[in-house]
């Protein structure tokens, strides 16, 4: 049994480890923004926290839709169907989604005046959103081509690009936020410009890599777009449901006081760093389970699912212990503002309980992506985050005066319910696949 576990774990890690590097790099780009903004001022951090909370809700729909590319192409590979030819269709849908999202960001900016944020934060919020809208094409191009390459288990180069961009982003942030020589201090605007440059570098790097190495010709297949909508729409809506739930905290509490939005962004940055590991394992699960599903290999499908879930939950359990042991150190990396620190520390303890269930749910999501049953993920997220978390968190935060802690208590409870729903439905779907396999 141990040899079998080691084999499947190694196979998953061969895909997951480079993705972990890339995912950590991706979130460290955001962490660099939080770090530099916090060093600049709490107001700057509050402004970009509110702005990113709003634009992430708009960005994530397209990112979630593109998340269907790797499981769809992995299934094609498992069924021995040609998959490389879907390079150009993947680019087309990424650019279309990017343009739609950019228009949505521009349309949202005038609404900021009516959301009752602190007046001193409003100009920086609107400037940050305006510049960020132009980064959408680069961001979506990178996301789409990363998924495309991941389907062929090519994960090293795209994630090395992301790691390189961590340092590029930190360098540009430092220069543009604080100023250097003839370059003036630009504050939140500098952060937005740095992100714009970095997103385009990431997208173009993968584009040139694919053009040089994948040797594909122009190709049209309307059924591919239909598959992306069928598989990707539930993924996209599920991720959007989760992101709206998380980012609504910054928006709602930001209306109470900007410092709560800053605290939420800081805490989310910390948890997202650790979350990148189970997310990478989830991506690897989706690829391996998708291949096994396409090949009708039930044994491998079940083994990759079980081993991947154990790996994801095990890592997050260790992470939760670390967070609960060193909360002051972790918060101190980003800010010395005593008021901000006082808000963040209690949240870290609650976060440590949430992390284990967060690791479980993302691993389960990878399994459902691999078997192309993404409606389950949407259903579970909707029930967990919208029917349980949002009303419960809002009640605890504003009616029971727990403030930011109330939302995080709600997250813990909703995560437990979400995981329970997904486990029950996964067992039903696995039995269904086994029965279909026996009939064949």
Image: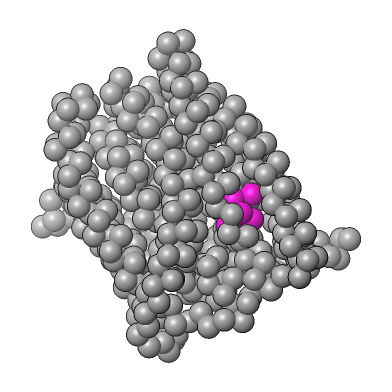
Quarter of the view holding residue 93 = bottom left
- For the C terminus, give its image quadrant: bottom right
In the image, 226 versus 214, the foreground residue is 226
In the picture as drawn, the residue positioned furthest to the front comes out as 439
Q: Which of the 4 image quadrants contains residue 213? A: bottom left
Our reading of the magenta stretch's main secondary structure is helix
The N terminus lies in quadrant: bottom right
Boundaries of the magenta span: 364-369
Residue at (55%, 33%) from the top-left corner? 384
* Rendering coords of residue 435 (x, y %): 77, 59
Which residue corresponds to the image point at 73% horizontal and 55% vertical from the top-left? Answer: 432
Determine if the magenta segment contains residue 321: no
Left or right for 53, reference 390: left
Residue 171 visible here: no
Which residue is the extreme one toward the top? 400
325 to the left or right of 186: right
Report x, y in % for residue 317: 68, 41
Where on the picture, by quarter, is residue 264? top left
Report the front residue among 249 and 385.
385
């Amino acid at each position: 049994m141990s040899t079998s576990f080691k084999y499947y774990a190694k196979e998953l890690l061969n895909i997951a480890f480079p993705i972990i590097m890339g995912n950590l790099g991706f979130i460290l780009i955001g962490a660099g923004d939080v770090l530099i903004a916090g060093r600049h001022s709490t107001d700057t951090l509050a402004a970009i926290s509110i702005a990113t909370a709003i634009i992430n809700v708009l960005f994530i729909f397209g990112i979630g839709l593109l998340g269907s590319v790797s499981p769809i192409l992995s299934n094609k590979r498992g069924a021995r169907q040609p998959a490389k030819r879907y390079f150009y269709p993947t680019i087309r849908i990424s650019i279309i989604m990017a343009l739609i999202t950019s228009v949505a960001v521009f349309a949202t900016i005038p609404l900021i005046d009516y959301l009752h944020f602190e007046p001193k934060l409003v100009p920086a919020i609107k400037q940050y959103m305006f510049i960020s809208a132009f980064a959408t094409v680069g961001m979506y191009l990178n996301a789409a081509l990363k998924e495309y390459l991941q389907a062929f288990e090519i994960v090293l180069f795209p994630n090395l690009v992301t790691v390189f961009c961590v340092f590029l982003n930190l360098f540009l942030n430092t220069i543009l936020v604080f100023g250097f020589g003839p370059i003036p201090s630009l504050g939140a605007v500098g952060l937005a410009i740095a992100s714009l440059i970095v997103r385009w570098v990431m997208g173009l790097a993968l584009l040139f890599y694919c053009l040089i190495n994948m040797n594909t010709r122009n190709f049209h297949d309307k059924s591919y777009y239909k598959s992306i909508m069928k598989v990707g729409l539930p993924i996209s809506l599920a991720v959007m449901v989760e992101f709206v739930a998380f980012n609504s905290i910054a928006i709602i509490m930001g209306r109470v006081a900007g410092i709560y939005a800053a605290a939420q962004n800081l805490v989310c940055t910390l948890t997202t760093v650790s979350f990148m590991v189970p997310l990478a394992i989830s991506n690897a699960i989706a690829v391996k389970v998708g291949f096994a599903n396409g090949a009708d290999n039930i044994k491998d499908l079940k083994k990759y699912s079980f081993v991947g879930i154990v790996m994801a939950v095990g890592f997050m359990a260790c992470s939760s212990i670390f967070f609960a042991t060193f909360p002051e150190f972790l918060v101190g990396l980003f800010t010395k503002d005593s008021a901000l620190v006082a808000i963040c520390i209690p949240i870290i303890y609650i976060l440590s309980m949430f992390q284990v269930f967060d690791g479980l749910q993302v691993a389960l999501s990878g399994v459902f992506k691999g078997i192309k049953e993404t409606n389950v993920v949407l259903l579970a997220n909707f029930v967990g985050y919208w029917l349980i978390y949002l009303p419960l968190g809002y009640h605890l935060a504003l009616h029971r005066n727990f403030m930011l802690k109330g939302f995080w208590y709600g997250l813990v409870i909703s995560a437990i319910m979400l995981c329970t729903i997904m486990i029950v439905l996964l067992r039903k779907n696995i039995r269904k696949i086994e029965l279909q396999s026996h009939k064949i």
